[in-house]
Image (cartoon, grey):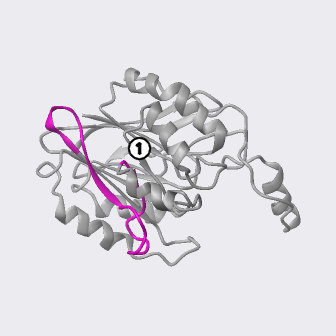
């Protein structure tokens, strides 16, 4: 099975890139299941119900969130109505929605998608991501209960993401980092068959400061004072993410490739 994971969608530019290119990418890479992180799709802050629908119409099978999961207030209710949206596992137990979902794919195959928030350098004291993920991994054995498992680790520190990758090694098909909006060059398959990438990057304009128009971030760095809101850059976006190929019997990764398409970054050729 081939699974595509695309990093954080940022603003209108990122949404446009998804709607114009996701279907093509799925065909070129022969994708069976597509996951999109929609964390910053609405004005760079969270995901609205309308923009979630747009991502699904474009071809996403699952949308993950992050620390801005409920910045758009309608997501508080919409996430209960649309089970294709996955929020972080390790936030409040009272939060709506779920942090782990099983999706049906063709030929009876099932994919478990989970997301957890890191704690290093993050603003909120989230629950332990290791124990949150462990509980779900014990409940759903790779290659038995499900054909593939994808873990979206939404975190600042690469060391914490790598630790999650090794924690899940042999128990997940893919562990992929999100949140920092900068794609890393360390796609690999770990010793027990788990594909790993520290950060998928973003689906947004790279002629920016992590997807935001450079003016306000520069003002704050130079003067130490805010002058207004961060607003997403509007120049053409690059789609960035990763494709993992798995063995349907064991769920382990047999191949992993970084994906970059359009915009400012060098493109990767489909396999």
Q: Which residue is mark 1?
A: 187
What residue is rendered at 32% in x and 60% in y?
Answer: 166
Give the structural element (helix, strand or loop) at label 1. loop
Front-lying residue, 36 or 94: 94
Against 223, is 53 above or below? above
Q: Is residue 41 one of those drawn in magenta?
A: no
Of residue 248 and residue 98, the one placed in the foreground of this image is 98
Residue 89 magenta-highlighted: yes
Q: Quadrant of residue 206?
A: top right
Percent across and percent down for residue 75 are 51, 57
Residue 91 located left or right of residue 3: right
Q: x and y percent of residue 163 in the render?
A: 38, 64
Q: Residues within 10 Å of mark 1 (few under 14, many from 20)?
A: many
Q: Residue at x 72, y 39 (%)?
A: 207
Measuring 49% from the left and 72% from the top, which residue is drawn there?
119
Q: Quadrant of the C terminus?
A: top left
Measured from the top left, where is residue 27 in percent x and y? 38, 21
Residue 201 seen from this side: no
**Quick check: 234 left or right of 181?**
right
Q: Is residue 160 above or below residue 148?
A: below
Residue shown at 44% from the left, 37% from the top: 56
Q: Is residue 197 visible?
A: yes
Residue range in magenta is: 84-110
């Amino acid at each position: 099975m081939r699974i595509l994971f695309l990093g954080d969608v940022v603003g209108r530019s990122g949404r446009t890139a998804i709607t114009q290119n996701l279907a093509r990418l799925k065909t070129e890479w022969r994708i069976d299941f597509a996951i999109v992180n929609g964390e910053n799709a609405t004005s760079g802050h969270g995901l609205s119900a309308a923009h979630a629908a747009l991502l699904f119409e474009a071809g996403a099978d699952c949308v993950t969130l992050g620390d801005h999961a409920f910045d758009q207030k309608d997501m508080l209710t919409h996430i209960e109505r649309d089970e294709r949206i996955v929020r972080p596992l390790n936030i409040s137990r009272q939060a709506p929605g779920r942090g782990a979902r099983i999706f049906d794919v063709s030929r009876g195959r099932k994919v478990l998608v989970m997301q957890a928030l890191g704690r290093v350098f993050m603003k909120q004291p989230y629950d332990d991501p290791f124990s949150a993920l462990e509980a779900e991994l014990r409940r759903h054995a790779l290659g038995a209960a499900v054909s593939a498992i994808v873990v979206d680790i939404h975190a600042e520190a690469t060391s914490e993401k790598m630790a999650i990758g090794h924690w899940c090694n042999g128990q997940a098909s893919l562990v992929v980092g999100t949140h920092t909006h900068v794609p890393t060059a360390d796609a690999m398959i770990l010793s027990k068959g788990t594909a790993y990438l520290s950060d998928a990057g973003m689906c947004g304009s790279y002629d920016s400061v992590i997807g935001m128009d450079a003016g306000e971030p520069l003002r704050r760095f130079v003067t130490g004072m805010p002058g207004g809101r961060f607003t997403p850059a509007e120049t053409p976006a690059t789609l960035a993410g990763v494709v993992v190929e798995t063995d349907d019997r064991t769920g382990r990764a047999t191949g992993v490739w970084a994906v970059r398409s359009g915009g400012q970054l060098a493109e990767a050729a489909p396999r």
